[in-house]
Amino acid sequence: MPGYAERVKVFGIYIQGGPIGVVVTTGGIRRVIEFRAVTKRFEDGTIAVDELDLAVEAGTITVFVGPSGCGKTTSLRMVNRMIDPTSGTILVDGKDVLTVDPPTLRRGIGYVIQQAGLFPHRTVLDNIATVPLLSGWDRRKARTRAAELLEIVGLDSNFGKRYPAQLSGGQQQRVGVARALAADPPVLLMDEPFSAVDPVVREDLQNELLRLQAELDKTIVFVTHDIDEALKLGERVAVFQTGGHLAQYARPTELLAAPANDFVASFVGRDRGYRTLTFLHADVPVHPVTTAKLGERITVADWTLVVDEQNRPKGWLSGVDGEVEVNERDLISGGSLYDGSSLRGALDAALSSPSALGVVVDDAGAVTGVVRADDVIQALAKARAAGEVPK
Amino acid sequence: MGWLFDPANWSGSTGIPLRLLEHLGYTLLTLVIAALIAIPLGAFVGHTGKGGFVIVGLSNALRALPTTAVLILVVLWAGLGDFPVYVALVLLAIPPIMAGTYAGVRAVDPVTVDAARGVGMRESGVLLQVEIPNALPLIYGGFRGAALQVVATATIAAYTGAGGLGRLVFDGLALQDFGQMLAGAVLVALLAVLVDLGFAGLQKLTVSPGLRPVGTGGKR
Amino acid sequence: MTWIFENWERFWEVTGVHLRLSVVPVLIGFLLAIPFGWWASRSQRARAVLFPFANVLFTIPSIALIVITPVLIGVKILDEINVIVPLTVYTVALMIRSVADALSAVPGNVIAAANAMGFRPLRRFLTVDFPLALPVTIAGLRVATVSNISMVSVGALVGLGGYGQLFTEGYQTDHTEKVLAGLIGTVVLAVLADGLLLLIGRLLTPWARAGR
């Protein structure tokens, strides 16, 4: 069946709320988590984290990314004392974590882990209410709060009575996030939370997290081994190198434009030039396009875009001689859609389209025109000339 | 089967109901004592992860201990009565309960335990609120295994003159009364099935529905 | 312990009887359990019948089974067969479950690969399924052997041989040393048999520890 794949899924580049590339003055920034010369050496002698110095700013998503064994998870787990450092100091809100009793510390910090780690013997609602109950809330208040959170993470209220085993992986992870948010902690630690779910669900969860963060404005530390996830979610990204070294700590755009060393360059990937486009917004000229509806009789001159009653794209028509009736059978399936988000979306729409014309849609999904790849390249050149792309 | 259905055998101080009650009494008190010893030990070792080999070794050694010999030794040492019966049966019941508890606590998904600590539970909370509830199916497994063994083995208590359904077997043996022996055997087996059904019901009531393996439409 | 050395010949003799009465049922019971266990591993329905039946067999007290067996199969009460049959019954009951669990635990992709390479069923069972099921099977066999060695003594309560004779004689003559000698013999025999099976298991399944 020809036609566009479901819009949400094809088209995954959403940019988080808040301006990108704002210059921040260090004076106005509150450091919520600080690592000072933190080293972790395990009993077998391996050094997991080596002299880590790093500060996490309030209200940001900071991503720790790197290959396995680079110390990113160990660093995260030292924040809520799941692991204690061998030397160095970790401050949360200015307070040395080693001076706080671990359970008390952890109740004030949200923690989300891979595969959610829900308690299988408790209902979803009771899972979410765990921390409020541990902190001494009364049962009724804790349950009301849990029900609220279920809604916040986008789950229907009838999920509350179910057990974790009755949920899909993605739903379990939503409950995991709700549980971490229950006592409204200012800091959220997320340890590869989305790596065990399939790519489509992962993307949903990532978008949901960005939406939540825009609303809740938490300080989030997020660990992943997936550079795409890191670039998508992180306002600041810390790239860890094998052996527990922090290789670079920067904004995604800087990381792509100016990798600190060969390791970062290779980890960020060969197509980082293309990835940079994700963070660029520029006006790309939108050209008009010939459209037709199903059942109409038309003469096909060149590529014709077939749309439905709401003007949403269904597919392309080409290579038909003379006057024909537009028929679903003859449609050539289309590529991704461009909704004005970033240059990457525009370029991808053009490159993936059978007509080499990227379909541009508005918020309702209706066609407004097409973009060409060479226009995108020109827009990029302009942006570069204006100094928007760091060298 | 005539002996079993003869009304004369269903009353008095040597009647079947009394023997059944005695047998049930040995079984239940034995299980309570054994559980009080074995569950805390198994749970503690399972939780800390240290000394697991001691639990396994101790379980195996106790399993090899012939109950008859233990019973006789304690009788020779402490005299006739119910005390030797309890010593022998408790030693019999400890290994399966301890092994089940240990295995159950060890088998709890490490991710779940990590999450329990991560949300700020203290060690006692991790054990009591997360590990033990999740270990319950295996704890019940060990406990019900122990119950079956205790019901069956309580029979030999009668060899040293104690009560219970074993009286029918040993008295029958002495009198060459096959009907009485058979009645004893059948009643013990019946009691074992009933006791197991009782604990199965208790298990259903106390184990979280979230841990039921199949039939709830769960994924995973 | 002195009793054992002073009465070495007697001790050695009851050890022999005890060993025979416990090992023979393990061997027969194991062989009988293989086809049933295989059946239970393949059919949900077989399992629904065999497992509860095996459980009920377990609930029959050994002393009762020992005194009933002669009447059921028509031999005298003082015949070794009266211990061998009940212990075989228990072994079968225990090993059906072990064999079934062991075979069910063989990874499906290995079986699929064997089928894809063209193994016929019997050959696949003997050269793929069964060897891979050995670790779990042997674990079951160890439990069966140890519990049999401990249970043989019950036969002495009706006058049959083995260490149990030392228990009953010791009880009747108020001779603690003699009971203790039998108890030590039983435990040592059980530990040795258990260790031997563990060793055999390791020799037969070198791959099981290769990954460690």
Image (cartoon, coloured by chain):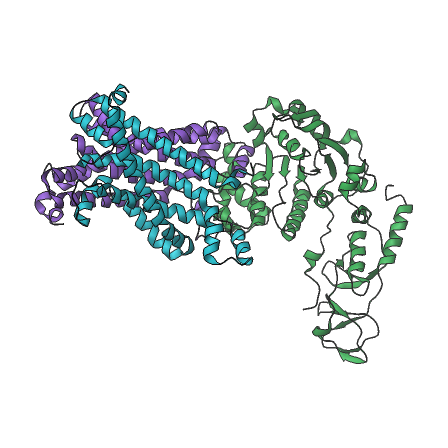
User: How many numbered circles are shown?
Assistant: 0
Chain identifier, green in the render? A
Query: Who's the residue at 61% across and 30% down the image?
Result: A80
As drawn, is A92 to the left or to the right of C9?
right
As drawn, is A280 to the left or to the right of A142?
right
C102, A178: nearer the viewer: C102
Q: Residue furthest left?
A: B8
State which quadrant residue A188 falls in: top right
Please provide percent x and percent y for residue A321: 81, 79
Q: Colour of chain B?
A: purple
Q: Residue furthest right?
A: A385
Q: Relative to A207, does residue B159 appear above or below in the rendering?
A: above
Query: Who's the residue at 48% across and 54% down the image?
Result: C124
Q: Relative to A150, does residue A330 appear above or below in the rendering?
A: below
Q: Residue furthest front?
A: C9
Query: Who's the residue at 60% across and 28% down the image?
Result: A81
C65, C8: nearer the viewer: C8
Q: Colour of chain C?
A: cyan
Q: Residue furthest top?
A: C2
Q: Quick one: quadrant of the C terminus of chain A? A: top right
Is residue C159 visible in the rendered structure shown here? yes
Is residue B94 visible in the rendered structure shown here? no
As drawn, is A366 to the left or to the right of A162?
right
Q: Quick one: quadrant of the N terminus of chain A? A: bottom right
Please provide percent x and percent y for residue B87: 27, 27
State which quadrant residue A257 falls in: top right
State which quadrant residue C19 falls in: top left
Please provide percent x and percent y for residue A52: 71, 28
Please provide percent x and percent y for residue B130: 47, 36
